[in-house]
Image (cartoon, rainbow, N blue to C red):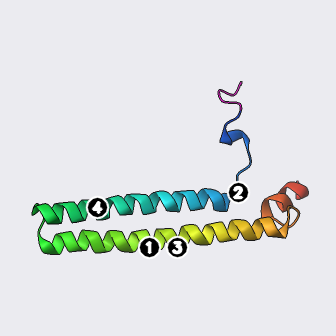
């Protein structure tokens, strides 16, 4: 089967912590959007105070956790890279096969 995009990321080896970091950043972006939604609906009066504050506080908590986890995932990626290719788990499995 011929690749549709020969230079795409699907053909490159991307470390799992980098992918995990990207997923956590996407979750943080969604949470940030919900914070903006909560503030806008609270300011316009479309949502009551308890519900609006709950949306804002919950989204803020999710955004903080997601940003921290993204940062930790990048730290793991740096640590894996510093160890070298022979000690990384994926390289170890490839060498055993």
Residue 68's tag is 3
Task: Tell which tag, 3 or 2, sits nearer the viewer.
Answer: 3
Q: Is residue 20 left or right of residue 29?
A: right
Q: Position of residue 48 (x, y in %)?
A: 11, 69
Magenta segment boundaries in residue numbering: 1-6
The relative height of residue 8 versus residue 46 in the rendered view (above or below) is above
Residue 5, magenta (yes or no) = yes
Task: Tell which tag, 2 or 1, sits nearer the viewer.
Answer: 1
The relative height of residue 94 versus residue 51 in the rendered view (above or below) is above
Q: Name the residue rendered at 23%, 64% in the picture.
A: 38
Q: CA distance from mark 4 to mark 1?
A: 15 Å
Q: Is residue 80 left or right of residue 42?
A: right
Q: Position of residue 24 (x, y in %)?
A: 51, 62
Question: On the image, numbered disc 1 is attached to which residue?
Answer: 64
Q: Position of residue 35 (x, y in %)?
A: 30, 65
Nearer-N-terminus badge (3/2): 2
Q: CA distance from mark 3 to mark 2?
A: 19 Å
- Dominant SS of magenta comes to loop
Task: Tell which tag, 2 or 4, sits nearer the viewer.
Answer: 4
Helix, strand or loop at label 4? It is helix
Nearer-N-terminus badge (2/1): 2
Residue 51's tag is none
Residues packed near mark 1 inside 10 Å, few (<14), some (14 to 19) or many (20 plus): some
Nearer-N-terminus badge (4/3): 4
Q: Are marks 2 and 1 in contact (CB under 8 Å)?
A: no
Question: On the image, numbered disc 4 is attached to which residue?
Answer: 36
Q: CA distance from mark 4 to mark 3?
A: 20 Å
Question: On the image, numbered disc 2 is attached to which residue?
Answer: 15
Helix, strand or loop at label 3? It is helix
Q: Name the residue rendered at 74%, 48% in the picture.
A: 13
Q: CA distance from mark 1 to mark 3?
A: 6 Å
Q: Are marks 1 and 3 in contact (CB under 8 Å)?
A: yes
């Amino acid at each position: 089967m011929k690749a549709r995009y020969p230079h795409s990321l699907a053909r490159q080896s991307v470390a799992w912590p980098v992918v995990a970091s990207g997923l956590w950043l996407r979750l943080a972006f969604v949470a940030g959007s919900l914070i903006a939604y909560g503030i806008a609906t609270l300011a316009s009066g479309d949502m009551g105070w308890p519900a609006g504050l709950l949306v804002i506080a919950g989204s803020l908590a999710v955004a903080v956790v997601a940003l921290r986890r993204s940062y930790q995932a990048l730290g793991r990626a740096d640590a894996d890279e510093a160890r070298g290719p022979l000690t990384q788990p994926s390289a170890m499995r490839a060498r055993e096969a």
